[in-house]
Amino acid sequence: MNLLLSAETTGWDTFLSVTQKLAGGFGTTLLLFFLTLLFAIPLGLLFACISRARFKPARFLMRAFIYVIRGTPLLLQLMIVVYLPGIAFNAPLTKWEIFHQNVPLSYFCGALFAFVINYACYFAEIFRGGIENIPKGQYEACEVLGMTKSQTFFRVILLQVIRNIVAPMSNEVVTLVKDTALARTVSVVEIFFTASEILRLQFIIWPLFYTGAFYLLFSALVTLFFGIVEKKLSRYWK
């Protein structure tokens, strides 16, 4: 992507050109954000179920894995996923056949994988806390009614869990909005990468503040969305 702006352009032309380039980078940011949520939420629910399993080895291994992922920086995980295969096994992501030598796609998928695993572990703890906060009487009532364990979970427990985890989930999702900027460290051309390149090539710093406006607006929309969801759920459960 050519980020170099002509020296002869006017201030307005420069603003429009920068806006266009940042919008393109923000498209990648949005794609990373929504794909992370799409895969991390169900995976987090699966992790939560395994971490509560009666089979002790599975429960121990899952909780240990979650502890490691939550206890190490996302930046480190990004670098391990993207660069470790090439360094340790001489098989960099850019040469994997599934990417067809598409370097940007390989870096994006590597970053997506790291984001999904990281946030699935955080979501797993939120789900686990929400599940464990459900009174045991709910399970006993379902058992008296003759409901199976799967029916109890999906028809009764999960709905209450969703109500209980809206607030902590909203915090994690807003954090994800900002964490997407870390993808630039593994050469994913998202909005912050684009702004940094404009700064490096054009020596103009205002695009960085302009980028902040994108994040602020998106975070505000996410917060507003979860606020509406929380209000609707509160009315439903009254």
Image (cartoon, rainbow, N blue to C red):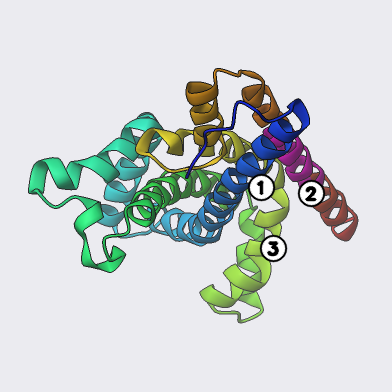
Q: How far apart are the two marked residues, 3 and 2, measured between alpha carbons?
A: 18 Å
- The residue at the far front in this view is 8
Kindly identify which numbered label has been placed on residue 165. Answer: 1
Residue 223 covered by magenta stretch:
yes
Q: In percent of the image, x 49 and y 41: which residue is there?
A: 2
Name the residue at 60% across, 19% down.
204
Horizontal side of 46 relative to 84 (left or right) equals right
Which residue corresponds to the image point at 32% horizontal and 50% vertical from the top-left?
A: 62
Quickly name the residue at label 3.
Answer: 159
Secondary structure found at label 3 = helix
Residue type of the residue flagged with mark 3: Leu
Question: Is 8 within the magenta?
Answer: no
Relative to 207, residue 176 above or below: below
The amino acid pointed to by label 2 is Phe
Looking at marks 3 and 2 on the same chain, the residue that comes earlier in the sequence is marked by 3
> Residue 216 location, x and y as percent?
73, 32
Residue 107: where, in percent of width, then height? 35, 49
Query: Mark 2 Cα within 10 Å, few/some/many (few <14, many 20+)?
Result: few
Q: Secondary structure at mark 1?
A: helix
* Mark sitting earlier along the chain (2/1): 1
Other residues around mark 3 within 10 Å, as few (<14) / some (14–19) / many (≥20): few
Q: Nearer the viewer, residue 49 or 54?
A: 49
Q: Tag count in the figure?
A: 3
- The quadrant the C terminus occupies is bottom right
> Which stretch did the figure color magenta?
214-226
Of pointers 3 and 1, the one earlier in the residue sequence: 3
Give the Cα separation between the discs numbered 2 and 1: 14 Å
Horizontal and vertical percent for residue 186? Answer: 36, 38
Three-letter code for the amino acid on which mark 1 is drawn: Ile
